[in-house]
Image (spheres, rainbow, N blue to C red):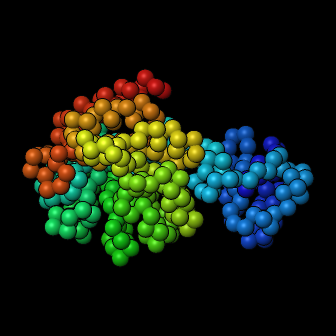
Amino acid sequence: MIAVLKQGTTPEQTEHLIKWLKNMSLDVHMSQGKEVTILGLVGDTSRVDIELLKSLEIVATVKRVSEPFKQANRKFHPNDSVISCGDVKIGGGNFAMIAGPCSVESEEQIIEVAQAVKAAGADILRGGAFKPRTSPYAFQGLKDQGIKLLLEAKKATGMPIITEIMNIRTLELFEDVDIIQVGARNMQNFDLLQELGKTKKPILLKRGLANTLQELLMSAEYIMSEGNENIILCERGIRTYETYTRNTLDLSAIPVLHELSHLPVVIDPSHATGRAALVPPMAVAAAAAGADGIMVEIHNNPACAMCDGAQSLTPEQFNELNQRVQKVREVIK
C-alpha cells in the first residue's frame, strides 16, 4: 500500500502520520521527491482503514500495490535509485563499465588486466575469487587468496572491486570488497540474501538462468527487507531452446525492470552469449536499450584463460567497445 501526501505537508505532520502507521506494526518507507512525498507501507496492511487514511487532511491518495515486491517497486520509490561505490555511481543517469577477468589467476594477471581496463575507461574491476562451476573438476578459483589479489589490484589502480560470494560462511572475507555479486545460481539462496541484507554494501544480483523478472525482484526484496537498499539488478542471459549461444540475452528486461522497479539494471553480455565476437554488439544494444551499466569479461590472454576464455575480450577490444558504448549513450541522451 502507498499513501501519497499533499504538497505543503510539514515534516512534523509526516512524522506524526508515520508514527501512527508504525503503531500498527507496519514498516514505513518514505520516498521524497521534488513535488511529492510517498509513504510505502509494508506488512499486514489489512489493519489499515483505507477510507480513514484517505480522509486525513495531509493525504492526497491511497493505493494498494498488487505486486508481491514492495520495496523494490517503483510505485514505492518513483525516482531512480543511485547506487554509490566510492566515486562511482550507477543508476539515475549514471553509467558504469565493469570489466575484468572471469577469475583471478595470479597477482601479475589481475594487476595487468586492472591497469589495462582502467586505461580503457572501466569504472569498476571485476574478478572471480570463488567460482561456481558446473563440473567439480573445473578450476574453482583462488578463493580467499583471490580476494587478496583483487585488493592488491585495487591498491594499484584505485578502482572499486566486485566479486562473487558463494555462501554465508565466507561473508567475513568480503569486508573490503566494494560490491558483492550474487551469481545466477544463488539468486534464490534466501538465507544468503537475508544475510547480505544485514550489510550496507552494494549487492549486484544476477538473474537466474530460468527465473522470471518477478522472481528476480522478489529476490531483491529479500535483501531489502533486511534493510539493505543498495541493490543493482543484472540480466546475464536466460536458458532457452537456442544452443548457438551460451544463453539468450533478454534485452527486454531493461525497459521492463525500469518500469517495474527503481533499481539500476546492468547487463552482462559475456555470460549471456559465451562468445567474444558477440559481446560488443550485445553491449552496444544494451546501452541503446537504456542499461545503467555493462559488465564484461576481459583477459590479457584469452586463449590461456583458466575460465571462460572463449567469451573474454582483450584489453584492446574492450577499449574499442567502451568507445562504441559511450557514443551510443551520447546519442540516446
Q: Is 8 on the left-hand or right-hand side of 255?
A: right
Q: Position of residue 15 (x, y in %)?
A: 78, 60
Q: Residue at x 69, y 66 (%)?
A: 43
Q: Position of residue 189 (x, y in %)?
A: 43, 68
Quadrant where the N terminus lies? Answer: bottom right
Residue in front for this viewpoint, 330 or 176: 330
Residue in front for this viewpoint, 225 or 91: 225
Q: Residue at x 37, y 32 (%)?
A: 285
Q: Is 107 on the left-hand or right-hand side of 164?
A: left
Q: Is 35 on the left-hand or right-hand side of 276?
A: right
Residue 163 seen in render:
yes
Q: Residue at x 33, y 35 (%)?
A: 282
Q: Is 250 on the left-hand or right-hand side of 102?
A: right
> Which image quadrant is residue 323 in?
top left
Q: Position of residue 161 (x, y in %)?
A: 32, 55
Q: Position of residue 16 (x, y in %)?
A: 82, 62
Q: Residue furthest bottom?
A: 169
